[in-house]
Amino acid sequence: MTRVTAPSRLHFGLFHVPGGADAAPARAFGGVGLMIDLPGVVVSARPADSWRFEGASASRAQVFAHRFIAGQPDPRPLHVLVERTPPEHVGLGVGTQLGLAVAKALAVEAGEPDLTAPELALRVGRGERSAIGVHGFDRGGLIVEPGKAPGEALSPLLTRVLLPDTWRVAVFTPNVGAHWHGGREREAFAHAGAVPRPPGLTDALCRIALLGMLPAAVAGDLDGFGEAVFEFNRRAGEPFAESQGGAYAAPEVEAVVTAVRARGVTGVGQSSWGPSVFAVTGSAAEAAELVRGLAGAARGWVARPSAGHHVERE
């Protein structure tokens, strides 16, 4: 039996949304994100008489498994159990982590334990836009990827930084109405690519990430890191402002961001399309206090920065 535990992914924002006057950039999308341990995804696979899929998101796990074994002659049947997975479409990168966890479990059971996350991702169809969750599955940490060049199937990894061991992330999921995925997400990208955007936005985001966020992370400068994360995240929302009604996906999200900042925590933002909000703190005690203080506004929990997935064999 093989059990794969995968982290969750926080997405701070994209460097470049293709379309409009600059429809042919050197690279499209790209961005910065952070892998955290909770809530995470756990998938197990064991030999069986016939293929079986059980647990939360079992039907989606089945799709990923069939993609992975496509073209293999007579693959050995397995019982695949999704033991734990967060809710989908809340900004935690569940689709990619579930797909990679299923693929990794199947690869180990098939005697291919050394397949990398990019190789697994291509086989199960992940990483179409962002590759943060793909590289983060293997490596964990703070991930920066430059985006896809024309003809590239997956954006390469630019750099990865492990945050200080004492830092923790408070994560909140405010109760909002409709979530951003599927057709709504595609429409938002199409609209963002068709309207003028602030001049120099991509350059500004790259400068914030490479000259502010990364050096502060390496130095363990929490205040500098937090201000860079907040500014990057807020500005990365600008191309989608008309679709979202602002820099954030919903008023409830913006209210949590504002409340966290009011408590003196600088490194706060919306993960991907939300509604999950992250806040980077210097200690477990500070993160727990933040979660308690905002209990009336959103469900929250404390997570550690993750070093990537791990595999158990029984």
Image (tube, rainbow, N blue to C red):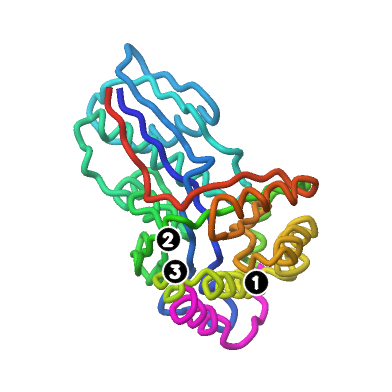
Height in image: 261 above or below 122?
below
- Determine the residue located farthest toward the front in the rendered image: 285
Q: Is residue 169 visible?
A: yes
The picture places residue 184, in percent across and down from the top left corner, at 68, 54
Magenta: main secondary structure:
helix
Residue most extreme to the top: 49
Q: Earlier in the sequence, mark 2 or mark 1?
A: 2
x and y percentages locating residue 97 in the rendered image: 45, 44
The residue at the point 30 percent across, 31 percent down is: 312
Q: Secondary structure at mark 2?
A: loop
Alpha-carbon distance for marks 2 and 1? 24 Å
In terms of depth relative to the viewer, which is nearer, 49 or 2? 2
For image coordinates 58% across by 73% down, the residue present is 232
Q: Dot 2 corresponds to which residue?
A: 164
- Mark in front: 2 vs 1: 2
Question: Whole-Å distance between the Cαs marked 1 and 3?
Answer: 22 Å
- In front: 278, or 178? 278
Numbered circle sitting on residue 220: 3
* Number of the label disc, if any, that sits on residue 234: 1
Q: Earlier in the sequence, mark 3 or mark 2?
A: 2
Cα–Cα span, label 3 and label 2: 6 Å
In depth, the one of 131 and 10 nearer the eye is 10
- Given this view, does label 1 or label 3 mark the residue nearer the observer? 3
Instruction: Assess disc 1: are there few (<14), some (14-19) or many (≥20) residues with their C-alpha within 10 Å of its C-alpha.
Output: some
In the figure, is residue 125 to the left or right of 71? right
Task: Report the residue at 51% width, 31% height from top.
Answer: 84
